Amino acid sequence: MMHIGITGGIGSGKSFVCRRLEAMGYPVYDCDAEAKRLLTENTELVKAVKCLIGKDAYQGDALNKAVVAQFLFSSSEHAVQMNSLVHPVVRRDFVTWAARQTSPVVFVETALLFQAQFDSVCDRVWCVTAPLSVRLKRVMERDGCTKKDVLNRQRQQLDDLEVQQRSDEIIFNDGKHDIDKQIQLLISKLSSHLC
């Protein structure tokens, strides 16, 4: 079985590519969604977050998003500390999930693939990219936020050029290149590795 990481900057279209892969019948692990689940279901992680932030990090069994957000945005070091708790748990969960799949290829979607060391559990990395102006417009329309907000969020991620250089393949999601054709070409390239 091959593990393929899907990454790219904010607004690049990672989720769109992953929806296309799912429509083609491939299993996709969504790190953002699974991290949210694990932050309430994984007792080891819940305990660690409470130790880091305090008991107010949770309201009953639910994550107290306001308290967590205040903690994360008060210091860049806080985000590093939180990620050091969350990323290993999500990575282990992905490996367990992947082992249960029957497809010869599984995908994992994460913006922080390299920072979270998901490249250590992936055979290949595909980077989804688009021009910054396109990405900014997409996120502002999608999230109803300002350009400044998007740029601040982007600063939390690796530079797009660095991500491309560290990836094995690039998918251009700029509205000019056909996404399905690019995916089919990359899937066909994988076939030679699966034989």
Image (cartoon, rainbow, N blue to C red):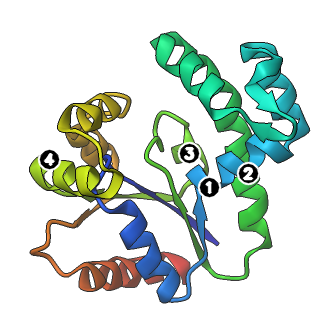
Q: Kindly identify which residue carries mark 1.
A: 33
Front position in the image: 86 or 192: 86
Q: Mark 1 is on which residue type? A: Ala
Q: Secondary structure at mark 3?
A: helix
Q: Position of residue 157 (x, y in %)?
A: 36, 34
Q: Mark 2 is on which residue type? A: Arg
Crowd rating for badge 2 (residues with CA inside 10 Å; few <14, some 14–19, many 20+): some
Q: Mark 3 is on which residue type? A: Phe
Crowd rating for badge 1 (residues with CA inside 10 Å; few <14, some 14–19, many 20+): few
Are discs 1 and 2 less than 8 Å apart at CB? yes
Residue 78's place in the image compared with 68, above or below, is: above
Whole-angstrom CA distance, mark 3 to mark 4, is 24 Å
Residue drawn where x is 54% and y is 79% of the image: 194
Whole-angstrom CA distance, mark 3 to mark 1, is 16 Å
Q: Earlier in the sequence, mark 4 or mark 1?
A: 1
Are discs 3 and 4 less than 8 Å apart at CB? no
Q: Which mark is residue 37?
A: 2
Quarter of the view holding residue 108: bottom right
Q: Secondary structure at mark 1?
A: helix
Relative to 1, 11 lies left or right: left
Relative to 143, 136 lies left or right: left
Q: Kindly identify which residue carries mark 4.
A: 132
Q: Secondary structure at mark 2?
A: helix
Residue 165's place in the image compared with 101, above or below, is: above
Residue drawn where x is 79% and y is 58% of the image: 96
